[in-house]
């Protein structure tokens, strides 16, 4: 039997999903991958599959839900254009039937080595243009999910390594976005 020499705090880079939340995040990532790149952010409600089949059998049939375990992602309406993501998330209130939520969003990031070279004092639009022109920039799709009970999961896919086997997963990969999603469940 081969040994796993991966340190325990290293994010999982395999598509093996061990929890319902991880499976839901990877399902959303795969769905977004099938739609291609250069897409707007997408918001999903996460509902308990057994509850959905019991309380909304028509919707479960329409979504072709198989089985009674896990979480089912339900895509929400498109996010409003031009409204900053943090402002939009501040307007959301979920009904009790929603166990969690997830968001998939594309961003351009820089490696830590390039962040030191960012010119100080650049206003937002100029900083965005500077990052977009940087030779070390990378395009990523981040899928982040949170549950009402505080559990979190994330998946990150690099555009240059756009493969299911190259998706990085872990609970703490995108803490700021996870915090923003968690705040949608606060009273």
Image (cartoon, grey):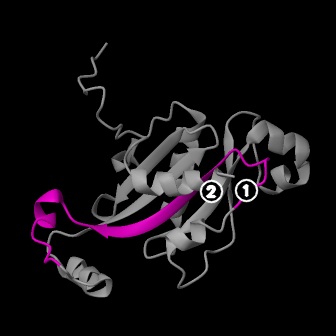
- Does 78 sit above or below residue 2? below
- Residue indicated by mark 1: 94
Which of these two is toward me, 66 or 121? 121
Answer left or right for 47 relative to 160.
right
Within 10 Å of disc 1 (Cα), the crowding (few <14, some 14-19, many 20+) is some
Is any atom of residue 132 visible in this view? yes
> Residue 146 got which mark?
none
Q: Is residue 183 magenta?
A: no
Answer left or right for 52 relative to 4.
right
Q: Quadrant of the N terminus?
A: top left
Q: Secondary structure at mark 1?
A: loop
Answer left or right for 147 relative to 37.
right
Q: Secondary structure at mark 2?
A: helix
Q: Give how far across and how far down residue 139 sits, in percent.
A: 31, 68
Residue drawn at x 82%, y 39% as measured from the top left: 51
Give residue 63's quadrant in the image: bottom right
- Residue indicated by mark 2: 184
Label 1 or label 2, whichever comes before in sequence order: 1
Q: Give how far across and how far down residue 64 sits, in percent.
A: 77, 51
Answer left or right for 146 relative to 163.
right
Residues at discs 1 and 2 in contact (Cβ within 8 Å): yes
Stretch of the chain drawn in magenta:
93-120
Farthest residue, direction front: 187
Within 10 Å of disc 2 (Cα), the crowding (few <14, some 14-19, many 20+) is some
Q: Give how far across and how far down residue 17 sits, in percent.
A: 50, 35
Q: Give how far across and how far down residue 36 sits, in percent.
A: 47, 70
């Amino acid at each position: 039997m081969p040994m796993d020499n991966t340190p325990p705090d290293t994010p999982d880079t395999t598509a093996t999903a061990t929890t319902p939340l991880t499976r839901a995040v990877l399902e959303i990532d795969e769905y977004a991958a099938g739609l291609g790149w250069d897409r707007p952010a997408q918001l999903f409600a996460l509902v308990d599959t057994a509850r959905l089949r019991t309380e909304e059998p028509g919707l479960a049939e329409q979504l072709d839900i198989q089985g009674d375990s896990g979480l089912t992602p339900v895509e929400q309406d498109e996010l409003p254009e031009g409204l900053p993501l943090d402002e939009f998330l501040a307007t959301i209130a979920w009904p009790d039937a929603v166990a969690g939520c997830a968001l998939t969003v594309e961003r351009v990031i820089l490696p830590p080595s390039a962040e030191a070279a960012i010119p100080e004092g650049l206003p937002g639009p100029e900083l965005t243009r500077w990052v977009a022109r940087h030779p070390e920039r990378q395009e990523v799709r981040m899928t982040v999910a949170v549950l009402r009970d505080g559990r979190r999961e994330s998946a990150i896919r690099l555009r240059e390594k756009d493969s299911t086997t190259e998706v990085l997963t872990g609970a703490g990969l995108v803490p700021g976005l996870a915090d923003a999603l968690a705040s949608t469940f606060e009273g």
